[in-house]
Amino acid sequence: MSGTIITVAQQKGGAGKTTLVAHLAVSLMQRGLSVALVDIDPQASLSYWYDARQESFGDEETGLTHSKISGWRTQREVEELAASHDVVLIDSAPHAEMETKTAIRAASLVVIPVQPSPMDFWATQPTLDLAKSEKVTPMLALNRVPPRAVLSEVIEGKLKKLDAKVAKARLGNRVGLAAAVLDGKTVSETQRSSVGAKEVKALAAEIYKAAGGAKRLK
C-alpha cells in the first residue's frame, strides 16, 4: 500500500491553510479513507486543532493519525505514513522555504489556497515556483470566497492565466468552518447538510482525484 501524499502550501500567512487541511482530512475520512496529518508548521495550528479533537472525541476516536515533525525527518516520516494510510495531508510552513520545499518534494500534488484578494494573488507565485522547481503538480483552490463579489471573479480569472489548474470547487467565507475548528471538529461534522459541508466534500473529492488517488470514495 502506498498512500496519496498531498501538501497544502502558501507562502503568505493567513490564507486559511490549516483550516483547509483539517476540513479535507475529515471529509476524506468520512468517505472511507484512512488519513494521516503531518504538521510541519512551527505555529503548530494543526496540532492544536488535533489536541482539541482528542478532547472532543477521545484519544483513540479522532479518526485520524497525527504527526508533528520538522527538518530532515520529514521525508522519511511522510513515506512511512503513506505506507499505512490512503492519504497523507501535510500542513506546510509559510515563510519557510526549505521546510516548504521538503513538504512539496514529498507530495504528488500541492494545493495552494488563495483568498480572493490582490495580496493573496500576488503571494501565490512564489509557492507555484517552488512546486515547479520540485516538479510537483500544483492546484489553486479559492478559499473564503464572499458571496456575489465581483473581485472574486476577477481574481479567479487571473488565477486561470497562471500555469496551474484552478479547482472547480471553492469554499465560501462561512463562519461555520472556523467555528467548528475551535472544538477540533469540522463543518462536515457540526453541520453535515450545510452548504459549507457540501463545498468541502466537493473540493476534497476534486483534490483527491487530482492527486491520483485510486481508492473509490464512499
Image (cartoon, rainbow, N blue to C red):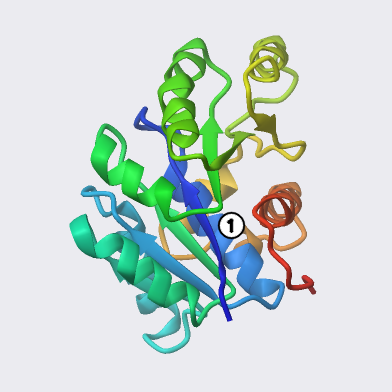
* Residue 178 vertical placement versus 71 (above, below): above
Instruction: Indicate the quadrant where residue 100 lies.
Output: top left
For disc 1, the neighbor class at 10 Å (few under 14, some 14 to 19, many from 20) is many
* Residue 67 vertical placement versus 172 (above, below): below
Identify the element where label 1 is drawn. helix
* Residue 47 vertical placement versus 30 (above, below): above
- x then y, percent, for residue 57: 45, 81
Answer yes or no: is residue 194 visible.
Answer: yes
Tally of marks: 1
Residue nearer the viewer, 55 or 143: 143
Amino acid under label 1?
Answer: Leu
Residue at 29% across, 54% down = 40
Q: Is residue 64 left or right of residue 160?
A: left
Residue nearer the viewer, 70 or 44: 70
Q: Is residue 74 left or right of residue 56?
A: left
Residue at 27% across, 45% down = 99
User: Where does the C terminus fall, quadrant-wise?
Assistant: bottom right
Q: Which residue is mark 1?
A: 24
Residue at 64% across, 64% down = 27
Instruction: Indicate the quadrant where residue 169 lies.
Output: top right
- x then y, percent, for residue 199: 73, 47
- x then y, percent, for residue 201: 72, 56
User: Where does the N terminus fall, quadrant-wise?
Assistant: bottom right
Residue nearer the viewer, 100 or 187: 100
Residue at 74% across, 50% down = 206
Residue nearer the viewer, 109 or 46: 109
- x then y, percent, for residue 159: 64, 19
